[in-house]
Amino acid sequence: MTKKIEEVRHLGEKKRPIAEKERETYDRDYSRYAFSYPTDKYKYVLKPGLSREVIEEISAIKNEPKWMREFRLKAYEIFLKKPMPTWGGDLSHINFDTITYYATPTDKGARSWEDVPEEVKKTFDRLGIPEAERKFLAGVGAQYDSEVVYHSIREDLAKKGVIFLSMDEGLREYPDLVKEYFGTVIPPTDNKFAALNSAVWSGGSFIYVPKGVHVEIPLQAYFRINAPQMGQFERTLIIADEGARVHYIEGCLPGGEQVSVGDRWVNIESLKPGDYVIADNGEKARVRATMVRRYRGEMLTIKPISPYNAFRLTPEHPVLVVRRSRVLQRRKPRNGWLPEVDTEKLFTAQPEYVPAGELTVGDFLVFPKVQAHNYNPRYSPELLKLLGYYLAEGSAFIHKTLNVPVVSFSFGTHEKEVITEVCDLITKITGKDAYVTELKGRHAVNVTVYSQELFDVCTSSCGTGASSKRLSDELMALPPEQIEPLLTAYFVGDGNVCDKGNSVMYRAATASETLAQQIQELLARKGIYASIHVRPGGDDTINGRKIHRKDQYIIVYTADKRWSEIRQTDRYFLVPIKEIERAPYDGFVFNLDVEGPSSYLVRGFAVHNCTAPIYSKESLHAAVVELIAKRGAHLRYTTLQNWSNDVYNLVTKRAIAYEDATVEWVDANIGCLTADTKVFLNPRGAVNITEVKPNDWIYALDLNTMEIVKRPVKGIVCTGVKPVFKLITENYREIKATANHPFLALYRSEKHWHLVWKPLEQLQVGDLIAIIDELPPKEGKPAEFVRIKALEPLGEEAVYDIEVEGAHNFIANGLIVHNSRLTMKYPSVYMLGKGARADILSVAFAGKGQHQDTGGKAIHAAPYTTSTIVSKSVSKDGGRATYRGQLVVAKGAHHAKSNVRCDALILDEYSRSDTYPYIEIDEDQVTIGHEATVGKVGDDQIFYLMSRGLSESEALSMIVLGFMEPFTKTLPMEYAIEFNRLIQLEMEGSVG
Amino acid sequence: MASTLEIRDLHVSVEGKEILKGVTLTVKTGEIHSIMGPNGSGKSTLALALMGHPKYEVTKGEILFKGQNIVELEPNERARLGLFLAFQYPLEIQGVPLGRFLWAAKKALLGQSQDGQTDKKADAKALSQFRKELQEKMKLLKMDESFAQRYLNVGFSGGEKKRAEIVQMHILKPEIAILDETDSGLDIDSVKIVAEAVNQLRGPDFGALVITHYQRILNFLKPDYVHVMIDGRIVRSGDESLVHELEAKGYDWLINESKAEVS
Ligand SMILES: Nc1ncnc2c1ncn2[C@@H]1O[C@H](COP(=O)(O)OP(=O)(O)O)[C@@H](O)[C@H]1O
Ligand SMILES: [Mg+2]
């Protein structure tokens, strides 16, 4: 393994410049291919660990100027010397040697295809990347996880001299400009992580706006479709020259296609992190993050045999397919026909992910069969049969005058056998006799029964109303053999079964879209690929009467012949692409980050995740954002995020505002964390971790003496919704913690015992970990060690962490645990010139089990400077919002004015909001205002809005959105809409 | 066919205290009823209870609207049936522009959810129609167009709030509207503007229950029926002439009379 690393390393020396023609390809995103690496294989290219050599190599790969290499190396020296920062949680458990600092596996300078490691070649082969591209890849190196692909800036901007590039490109193309400013706002000496970033940075944005130029449209870095949080060490530098104006949006908003969630399909944008979808193996997988981005470019519509199952995606989105070119027969293709496929080859071919843009007509899409195996004895074959008839021809309602529940079926007069069967089934199931009434003149027969029991079963498992019938989760989870009678009855009841001699064609029509999808799904599970056609509804005239017809979904399949072009294995169908349509598109596109199989189903077909979840664990995010607003410039930086705070960790964001310049930081945080862990406080005793407040005294372990000590709490923070495990000790102490939460463990290696902080996932049953035997803890008592009895996964939970002053552990549930949270650094503005302005606006939404911890910092270092720090938070369902506003007025900054304003909107009595102003003032002539309002939504307001027709939750979201309006109106329209949609999503179900 | 709001022996309590003590009243579309009465007699209570304010508990009696007992319905469901209340004290909602709010309300009344999947083109067309209509209605109430962009009632003067209520009524087109002291705090010109706006809706498909203290607005509205509420009961009903009688005699004679009745 080591050998290979070296081999790769010295290949990176010389680089040829990228030719214009190749640039296009260069900018493409190859990171998605990373999924196909087995993790252990992937590592050998990742080359973990940090050393002078690694840094030199990064610099060489990037072909950087000498000064940058020296800058990196110097930063590395500083990094080594700097102590761990005190503003974060303790970081001593981070092992810098296990981190990968530059992740471009194929790119380590391999200049010819031969040099490309075998593993990578295999992947490329599987991906079917064209030869030309392979050559190119070999020559220049693909962009993997660390770099960001940038959209081109609009031509008029370019004309005005605005530079908007990735940081890497910026350095290549404008080395002098970069040299002048790089690291001037946040020098490597600022803190250990700024030093680290300076040493190994990669990716990020570089923006320069020349004097007096106003950029009217907000500049947005569309992070690559994969893993927006992967900019591990990204570096952003924005310079607004004198009198310039610019707004930059660092935006990753979560989010349409229809995605399978098992029992039905839902719109992709309605999914939230934590929801489950079906992955390419037909099993459920959890959504880790949802994202949306603005997309301007070509949009593909992939049309399989069943036109209804056509779906749209962007050209770079990987789709699971078997390429036709790979499974051809040797025979020459007949004229005008697609080359014929060797079935043998097709079956043995391993499906692969191919970017949609590279697909061709005839390639086989993969339609996984959703796996269902929950046999349920409640559903007898008779009942399922009757439900099948109900789906086809039944209705359930409460009889108006009699006020009794009725289930009724209508058939044609000629369907004698069916009528008899339904009557029998009804009697068997309900013990009651059905009434059969013939509707004269309409050649129809009604079969009716008054049965509460049947009414309940029908409505709860199949719904009511022609267009809203659907199968319940329970029915959809039944194994194929069990559900069979329902399907048969459904087609007998509704469909027309058309015997064409050698093949029987089944057809059924329904006004319920969901039902059509479900039936297709059920057929798929038993090995039948049915197609769906849509017959659009509209106004029509039947027998002289005007009627409005709803859209009809027609499900068609041929039983014995089957689609000659469709093949199946036991887990999926292979469905050929009939047509690929390309059209320009401008709007939002959505994507999901799904755990495990990293894929999901769109209209039944498997597509790949946005993310190659390679660094999802234990990765260190140490970004640096530097903003410089020169005299009279106006610079706004907006961050929108709605996933866990991991992404934020250790990001150092700072701005400098010179004379009369204005810097605005706008930050929005939606979504984040919880726990019922008990910690011991003095003197309050055992409390839930969520009850801990800064400056409480907490018990911790002094690692030198191994005795219990009391330490003040610096803060409590949420760290995300994560998989949680339960650890049980032999003396039955239990604690729930995330996989990476460190515990104090005692290990024996050869002759010595070692005390080590070990993340839970590395612990094993039988390992010794530190505990406090006697509870509540007493100062001066020693720690003891006990063996782990069990470790069990518990699923997902929001988790909290505590920062402890002077100790980096605390006692939780009697166990000694390390604190793991790394505090974000809040955005700050240094006002260095007379008349400079800082506006920091932070918006947070804390829902159930969430704790939002946000803040901002304004430093007045010149006279007549003005700052406003505004925080707006909404908390509901027990959510908690904390805001830390820090204000510093240095000596000499006379006539500084500052206004700190915290508005909180609390939607119920369980939620809370806290603000912590930290104010340091070294100057007398200053005006400081501090205001805090806490609003509660009143019944009267809700009533007022409801009296106009809004539902309670609509009224609530309207009030919340109104409260957020000062923030929303700073956003460009499409972001504002998206933000509002998110809030509405959060507000749903908050009522009743 | 006329729609009917039929109040039968309505008893309403607020925080355990009985305010309405048996109100019976029927309002049909095509009719204008007026309720007058001294302060604190329960007029607003009646209005809020009819609209379904959660604090106003119906302890006895029925409210039938279009033949359906609406006592258990949510305020928005009542609105969807065609009921509207112009508030005596309209509420201020920060950050929600009047126009945006009304558009949401209108869509809700039409049964479209906020972000439901609607036909985009049709939606855009409906929106531009709505904008035009809103402009017209604001003109009718002599309100500046800019009010559409202003946050709902925030910083509106008393009179502007009341006129905005009538704009809302015009946009939402209820079958039965309850106007709770819409004329209070308005100067004589504004009263006229409001009255004319109400009169414009008048017709076989619109009915109103106008709560007021003053004759002024009634002179413009010419109610078909006039009721006097005292201490949670309707003690006298009559035609427009009752207004003049009240003007001349005040409420005292009725108060004394009603006391006599009770004892
Ligand atoms: N929300 C409330 N809480 C407590 N008392 C109320 C409330 N609303 C009305 N009341 C009481 O009910 C009585 C009738 O009030 P109201 O209906 O407003 O009278 P009107 O509108 O006729 O002036 C008054 O005594 C008033 O104090
Ligand atoms: Mg009143």
Image: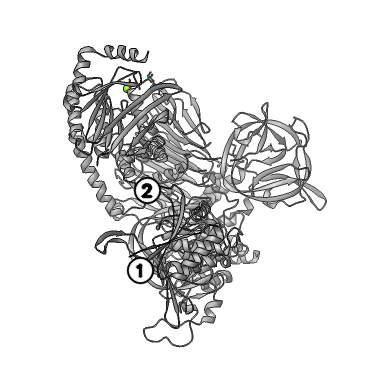
Split into quadrants, the picture shows ligand 1 in the one at top left
Q: What residue type is labelled 2?
A: Asp
Q: Which chain carries label 2?
A: B
Amino acid type at circle 1 is Glu
Q: Position of residue A542 (x, y in %)?
A: 27, 64
In the rendering, which numbered label is found on residue A475? none
Residue B58 seen in render: no
Residue placed most toward the observer, A37 or B51:
B51
Give the x, y percent position of residue A939. Answer: 42, 30
- At a point 46% along the width and 88% down the height, the residue shown is A331
A596 or A816, which is in the foreground? A596
- Which residue position is annotated with label 2? B115
Image coloring type: one colour
Please give the label number shown on residue A581.
1
Disc 1 on helix, strand or loop? strand
Q: Position of residue A224 (x, y in %)?
A: 45, 56
